[in-house]
Amino acid sequence: MNSKAAKAKRRADFKRRFKKVAYTKRWAVTVTRVRIRQAVARRPWPHWHLLAFSGPKRSEARGVVDLIAIRKDHGLPRRGTKRGDDFQIILIQVKGGYAAMPTAEDAKRLRLVARHHRARRVLLATWKKGKAARFFSLRRRLNGFDDWLEVDDLETIFG
């Protein structure tokens, strides 16, 4: 095979793999949203709202956060605010297919973003075709152990 044909084949293979990754990512986000909605369906008001970030043509957007779960905080207000002025925020990163787990740098960035937005928690959702979505919670500080702890009960997170 000549070099032009080989380059064209590699380019076509790259495009095919890129489309598959984008497709898997969209499904991972969809499955994650469904699983969260199932977990919070029995919860009383106030309800969680899920906001997904996508790039042009529904492709993956830049940044470390893929989903945000947000609801009004009707607890005791902070000084200078009234009840219902604040929000409760959970940041969610989604990995689909055989995407690698987030790196230590990703975890650091997520912690910075969470601190900036006063997020109450950071979650990682992973999904592979044919399997249920799995959720992991980011430790607030790294203390020599893994950054991520598996979450068995989503209702405790979204309580």
Image (cartoon, rainbow, N blue to C red):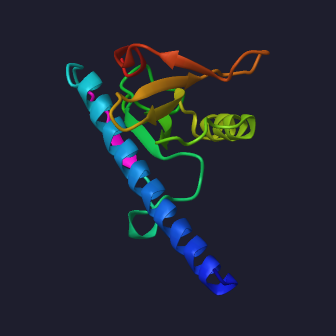
Q: Does the segment drawn in magenta span residue 48? A: yes
Q: Position of residue 20 (x, y in %)?
A: 43, 57
Residue in view at x 46 percent, y 25 percent? 135
Residue in view at x 30 percent, y 30 percent? 35
Using the image as rendered, state which of residue 11 and residue 38 is in the foreground: 11
Using the image as rendered, state which of residue 141 and residue 72 is in the foreground: 141
Q: Look at the image and give the residue range highlighted in magenta.
A: 46-52
* In this view, 16 is above or below 64: below
Q: How many labels does the image show?
A: 0
Residue in view at x 47 percent, y 54 percent? 21
Q: Does residue 36 appear to the left or right of 86 in the view shown?
A: left
Q: Where is residue 49 in the image (x, y as percent from the top left)?
A: 32, 39
Residue in view at x 39 percent, y 63 percent? 58
Return the residue found at the far right.
Answer: 144
Return the residue found at the far front.
Answer: 1
Quadrant of the rendering where the N terminus is positioned? bottom right
Q: Position of residue 76 (x, y in %)?
A: 43, 19
* In this view, 96 is above or below 77: below
Q: Does residue 43 appear to the left or right of 53 in the view shown?
A: left
